Image (spheres, coloured by chain):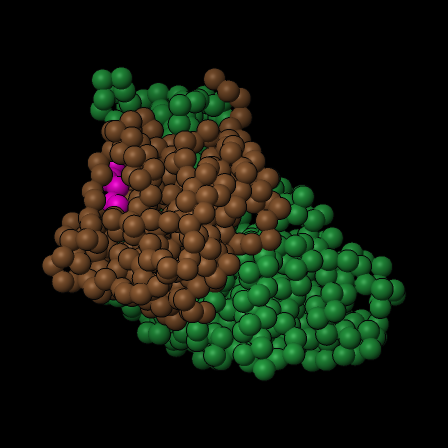
Amino acid sequence: MKPVLKQNPLESEAIYIFREVVAQFENPVLLFSGGKDSITLVRLAQKAFYPSRIPFPLLHIDTGHNFPETIEFRDRLVKELGLQLIVRNVQDDIDNGKAIEEKGKYSSRNGLQTTTLLDAIEEFKFDACIGGARRDEEKARAKERIFSVRNDFGEWDEKNQRPEVFDMLNGRIHLGQNVRVFPISNWTELDVWSYIAAERVEIPSIYFSHEREIFDRDGLIWSASEHVYREDDERIQKRKVRFRTVGDMTCTAAVASEADTIEKIIQEIRGSSISERGARIDDKRSEAAMETRKQQGYF
Amino acid sequence: MEVLKIATAGSVDDGKSTLIGRLLYDTRSLTSDKIEAIEKSSRKKGLDYLDFSLATDGLVAEREQGITIDVAHIYFSTQKKSYIIADTPGHVEYTRNMVTGASTSEASIILVDARKGVIEQTYRHFFINNLLRIKEVVVAVNKMDLVNYSEEVFNEIVSDFTKLQQDSNFKEQRLTFIPVSALWGENIAERSTAMKWFEGPSVLEHLENIKTENLQETSQARFSVQTVIRPKTNEFHDYRGYAGKVTASSFKVGDEVTVLPSLTTSTIKEICFFEEQFDEAPAGSSVTITLTDDINVARGDMLVKTGEVPEATKEVNATICWMDGKPLLPGNKYLLQHNTNGVLAKIDKINAHIATNFQPAGDASSLKLNEIGSVTLKLSKPVFADSYNKNKENGRFILIDSQTNTTAGVGFIQ
């Protein structure tokens, strides 16, 4: 037995939030993308309910344009921890005409995920969707509550949010509404990496420096792939890169990097003059890109 | 690393956003793409300087109107500490959002415009800081450059503020006055060269020296059960753990505890956190506790040390900050959420309306949105609560409107 527990305050807060979710909701789900933030959530959930298993399933909204490394990783993690994984495909909604594929140079399936996500919430009657969004990522996310109520169209009413005082989380909702829950709201990118390092959490290989076929556009490094539209004059090259955030291939740019260990990644982030989402093509669409997507029901 | 949560408030005209922007800039926390975005937006608005409020006002409506509507959380760190700033609105119509932001903070910065002195909004923020019992308050007297860095102007504001404090019943609060010019970075991160007459620290220097452990009050240990952990696996067949957070003081293995409301007693057998066990869990830790006896404990129950049992009461007097468009009226019923325990509450009477400006208190027949009052509530079942002054975590509650499900108000038990 160890003497006095010294818990990381961010970890205590996240675990407290997870436990409130399980106590207050009938049918929660963890939105899992295979990125470092949702992997961190899985680790926290494991600790919150130990020695019980994680008492809710994972939901992956698959755009079909994922990095294969992420999918491999996802399947391995689910198997090791004995979790239940639900996958819903954006491709299915495109095939049945519910979602329409974007065209042109900047086409992406990122925005299309919202339709598939909202349908899955309705299909399984999820009342709480736990996500890895953090307030330091983006200015609209900086405005989020920890329990954020969505109406039955999945919309976020950002100008009239439910007051959230102290640590008292009010998860009461009407039938058909759902709550988005953000246990790592108060973590920064560095906090996540420090936690991954301290806990020795495994993460997909694309976060580490590797050689990849890429092309340059608008000052960003894009992955060369059949899923990513490329002009004839956008020449494919090989470069040492890594990904700082991992989303869909069409909306996540790479960064030039030699960092091949977590310690080197932490060093690199400390010295970086570019923000984490600086390489998110989806945020660059307009000043209010995130707020608009969130109003419609995005993650 | 040490984390310090700070609330700031003031209208945009007080230079609050400039101050936060300056803190971020001087601690090299603004990344180049964020600065670029601010430059671009500033140019679009026809400004010839960087408008840092564009970094903190994250909603379209806020940027359009140039005001802060809701709390934004901003993060930066130094070698010594991680800071979380809850940037809260100062306008009276957003008081509830100010309370939301300030409620999770341990320290606060109140901005005063040197040209205007102590105004209604300053008083409101000060009042809410007192109500929440925030121990460490920095009063940043801003725009000193526009009053020729005058020591007299600063001293006058200090004396006005000190008069306000005399009426306060929270004497442990520490006020630190700092003259600043956020625009020129005077006394923000570095000490000012324009105000050599001021011998105190810069804002950042002061924040760095705050000892976060001193911001906690010493109260009796409480442990509200969030959920019961019963794995029912072969390995943990009879395991029955109570998951929750220790608030105040600490719990140790071997402590004799009383379970509320049943008043049954037992002894702490194990304090578990993931795969390890500990002898002691201090305030703030999220753990799982097992007891030596097989007794009935569920969500909403509270463990306390035997001999430290708070009094049970079915009548509560509280200061309530009202947060809902539908007013609070005598006779109305709400769900009262006290820690993890919920009971029905009926508003018995409104004893007084409390003014958060310099005006005399209004009539006490109702509490409207953003108003604060002293209220008596009758409860369907007794709660084991402390007064907020004695035990913050066990002395507060929220009122939930059971028709709309919204959090309609927050109460501080007197």
Where residue B28 sits in the image (x, y, percent)?
65, 54
Helix, strand or loop: magenta stretch: loop
- Out of B105 and B217, give the one closest to the viewer: B105
- Out of B253 and B64, give the one closest to the viewer: B64
Residue B127 seen anywhere in this rendered image of the structure: no
Residue B77 seen anywhere in this rendered image of the structure: yes
Q: Residue at x 42, y 57 (%)?
A: A234
On screen, residue A67 above or below A273 = above
Residue situated furthest left in the rendering: A96
Q: Residue at x 52, y 46 (%)?
A: A256
Where residue B345 sits in the image (x, y, percent)?
31, 59
Quadrant (top left, top right, bottom left, bottom right) of the N terminus of chain B? top right
- Out of A105 and B144, give the one closest to the viewer: A105
Q: Is residue B100 highlighted in magenta?
A: no
> Is residue B357 shown left or right of residue B367?
right
> Is residue B3 shown left or right of residue B79?
left
On screen, residue B108 above or below B211 = below
Q: Residue at x 76, y 79 (%)?
A: B146
Using the rendered view, name the quadrant where residue A48 is placed: top left
On screen, residue A50 above or below B324 = above
**Chain B, colour shown:** green
Using the rendered view, name the quadrant where residue B47 is placed: bottom right
Q: Residue at x 23, y 22 (%)?
A: B233
The residues colored magenta run A53-60
Where residue B317 sits in the image (x, y, percent)?
43, 59
The chain painted brown is A
